[in-house]
Image (tube, rainbow, N blue to C red):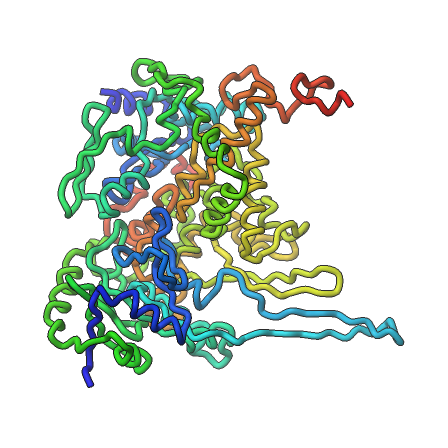
């Protein structure tokens, strides 16, 4: 049982660090919540199942402690990217890796069950989700209610870890599927795409959940969306301002976004903000052949330059 | 004249169209999977099945509003002298919020004590508030995280509503609460509601019984020693990511910021929502920040609702239990769990020797 192995491992890791971050059950049966273990008896609260959606690595750059961290395959890319950018010290973290067969999207599950409160949820054979509400029981296929990132997941097993819970899993998803949604979307005429974004961003309330949940948004309290000196962005609530914020967010993540999808998952207004980041990542991939958070030896393209960049024509003028 | 009204479902759109002739009618609309208040128009998809993602507070207390515009004019004869022209526009339309939830309506009562029922009312808020009619819809079932009955509300609570409607099988039962609300049942398409009263009351009661009280005891007193313990806040708030979702989605959070946005000689003074979760919230001009950590800021949010506001306003709790801050929190921080600890109910999170226990002294 991988949960027992996880608890056993965390109990051991606990003695080497100040805090271990894992998952525990949240306020209702549909939600998990991050669990900061500072007492040995808390280890028993740990859970491991498709409810464990958060990318826990977001806390790492801000914790001035020795931390044990539970990561899924996708989350592990963040750690590699952090290390490439010098944001964390490898010696200060102990990584407990969990090979993952996919998580749920809370929003997608809620959509399927008419937003009813969940009375119980069970996972069957790693492919089905049985959800009980006052309206009765519904069996959902995990592949229908997983976040988009899981349907094209290339890295189900963490790329970096100190302890691995269970056997490594290989991806069975074709690599070219990762950006299929973006390529499809780009086929639409420019006007249609603009209208799409204007409609979506109209709902934005600038709560900055997308920014704060983003592991690579490391400016945080110094974000230009809020600073008054210099005063870059207006406090007015026009589409232009909202657009501006989201474009800055996306551009700041060029060649850095590890595509964990946290920005989109946390949006309380249901805005598909991850699309923008994926688009920019696709550009970076085509231009520099770089994929963030995959290989520790890589140099992120925005951290270096070649005088004669192979795919950039402008310098040949 | 009937005391209560009834609107058959098939006349719903026609009713809203008629209402829209004389007022701006905000209704909860479905956009994707998100429910949001929008001015009524026939092509929108109305959604009365669940509470909106964001409460209607933004209609009376906009997220961003221009308080006034200013224009500096130099005197051509004496360049040392500058005249300033100020302009303000407080011509607000008549508004009907149709389909708010009882918790949303109660939120406005929390606002009223601060912005209106004082010697120095906030005219921007007051003018809008007085021109708004709030028609709530009683809740048929709770959403995840709802706890209104634990903070003095309920799925058919009337506080703050001008009229309250209850969805029945084929229509809506309408019960006026205030004089403003009585005008609603005089509108076209509204029939006599008395034959439906019994059914409506039964539905309201059934909904009430479905709500859970997250607090395991009736104790309402907050433990001062726990409330003032840094260790407690660090324990319960470590996972908070300091975004503003909880406060911006809260029907009772009213903190704001004021910014002058000026280009050359002209500009505007803007009032926009602020959130105590943000670092800049209490950042002072000197650079000093009295609440530099998220623990202190979070303590302020809970304190404002469950300690400071009640102290100032006769024990009234500034939380309406709508559950949005729990439902939409990126990391599922649960305010009812935290208040439960503070009230001494539930399990105290700090039992057992802490890792930092040696230094806690």
Q: Is residue B94 left or right of residue B337?
A: right
Q: Is residue A312 left or right of residue B154?
A: right
- With respect to residue B343, does A216 lie above or below? above
* The furthest residue to the front: A189
Question: Residue, x 20% and y 72% (percent of image)?
Answer: B6
**Spot occupied by residue A217 in the image (x, y as percentages of width and height):** 53, 37
**Spot occupied by residue A249 in the image (x, y as percentages of width and height):** 55, 40
Q: In this orientation, which residue lies closer to the viewer: A33 or A184?
A: A184
Q: Is residue B277 visible?
A: no
Question: Residue, x 27% and y 43% (percent of image)?
Answer: A110
Question: Residue, x 31% and y 82% (percent of image)?
Answer: B179
| Quarter holding residue A11 | top left
| Quarter holding residue B74 | bottom right
Q: In this orientation, which residue lies closer to the viewer: B340 or B226?
A: B340
Q: Quadrant of the N terminus of chain A?
A: top left
**Spot occupied by residue B92 in the image (x, y as percentages of width and height):** 49, 74
Q: Is residue B108 visible?
A: yes
Question: Residue, x 37% and y 35% (percent of image)?
Answer: A36
């Amino acid at each position: 049982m991988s949960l027992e192995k996880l608890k056993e491992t965390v109990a051991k890791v606990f003695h080497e660090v100040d805090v271990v971050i894992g998952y525990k059950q949240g306020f209702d049966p549909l939600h998990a919540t991050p669990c900061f273990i500072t007492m040995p008896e808390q280890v028993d609260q740990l859970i491991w199942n498709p409810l464990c959606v958060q990318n826990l690595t977001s806390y790492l750059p801000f914790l001035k402690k020795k931390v044990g961290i539970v990561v899924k395959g996708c989350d592990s890319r963040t750690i590699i990217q952090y290390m490439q950018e010098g944001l964390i010290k490898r010696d200060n973290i102990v990584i407990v890796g969990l090979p993952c067969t996919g998580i749920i999207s809370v929003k997608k599950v809620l959509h399927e069950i008419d937003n009813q409160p969940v009375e119980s949820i069970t996972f069957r054979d790693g492919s089905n989700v049985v959800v009980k509400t006052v309206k009765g029981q519904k069996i959902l296929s995990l592949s229908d209610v997983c976040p988009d990132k899981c349907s094209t997941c290339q890295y189900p097993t963490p790329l970096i870890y100190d302890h691995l819970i269970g056997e490594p899993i290989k991806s069975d998803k074709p690599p070219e599927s990762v950006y299929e949604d973006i390529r499809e979307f780009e086929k639409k005429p420019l006007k249609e795409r603009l209208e799409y974004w204007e409609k979506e961003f109209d709902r934005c309330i600038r709560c900055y959940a997308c920014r704060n949940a983003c592991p690579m948004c490391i400016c945080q309290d110094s974000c230009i969306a809020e600073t008054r000196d210099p005063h870059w962005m207006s406090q007015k609530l026009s589409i232009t301002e909202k657009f501006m914020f989201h474009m800055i967010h996306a551009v700041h993540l060029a060649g850095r976004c590890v595509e964990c999808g946290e920005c989109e998952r946390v949006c309380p207004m249901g805005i598909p903000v991850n699309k923008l980041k994926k688009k920019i990542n696709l550009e970076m991939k085509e231009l520099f052949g770089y994929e963030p958070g995959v290989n520790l030896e890589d140099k992120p393209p925005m951290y270096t330059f070649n005088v004669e960049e192979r795919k950039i024509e402008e310098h040949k003028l | 004249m009937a005391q209560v009204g009834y609107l058959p479902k098939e006349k719903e759109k026609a009713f809203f169209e008629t209402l829209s002739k004389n007022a701006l009618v905000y209704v909860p609309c479905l956009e994707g999977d998100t429910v949001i208040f929008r001015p009524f128009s026939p092509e929108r998809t109305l959604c009365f099945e669940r509470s909106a993602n964001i409460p209607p507070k933004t209609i009376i207390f906009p997220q961003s509003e221009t308080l006034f515009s200013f224009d500096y004019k130099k005197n051509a004869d004496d360049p040392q002298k500058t005249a300033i022209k100020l302009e303000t526009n407080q011509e607000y339309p008549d508004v009907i919020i149709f389909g708010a939830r009882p918790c949303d309506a109660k939120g406005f009562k929390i606002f009223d004590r601060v912005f209106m029922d004082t010697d120095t009312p906030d005219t921007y808020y007051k003018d809008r508030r007085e021109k708004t009619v709030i028609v709530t819809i009683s809740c048929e079932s709770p959403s995840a995280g709802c706890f209104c009955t634990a903070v003095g509300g309920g799925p058919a609570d009337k506080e703050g509503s001008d009229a309250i409607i209850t969805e029945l099988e084929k229509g809506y039962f309408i019960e006026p609460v205030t004089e403003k609300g009585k005008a609603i049942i005089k509108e076209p398409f509204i029939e006599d509601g008395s034959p439906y009263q019994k059914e409506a009351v039964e539905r309201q009661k059934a909904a009430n019984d479905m709500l859970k009280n997250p607090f395991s005891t009736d104790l309402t007193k907050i433990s001062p020693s726990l409330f003032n313990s840094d260790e407690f806040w660090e324990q319960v708030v470590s996972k908070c990511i300091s975004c503003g979702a909880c406060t911006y989605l809260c029907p009772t959070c009213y903190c704001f910021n004021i910014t002058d946005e000026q280009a050359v000689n002209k500009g505007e003074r803007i009032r926009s929502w602020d959130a105590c979760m943000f670092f800049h919230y209490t950042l002072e001009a000197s650079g000093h920040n009295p609440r530099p950590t998220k623990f202190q800021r979070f303590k302020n949010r809970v304190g404002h609702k469950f300690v400071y506001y009640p102290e100032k306003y006769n024990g009234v709790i500034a939380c309406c239990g709508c559950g949005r801050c729990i439902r939409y929190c990126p990391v599922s921080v649960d305010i009812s769990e935290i208040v439960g600890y503070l009230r001494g109910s539930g399990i105290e999170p700090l039992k057992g020797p802490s890792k930092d226990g040696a230094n806690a002294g």
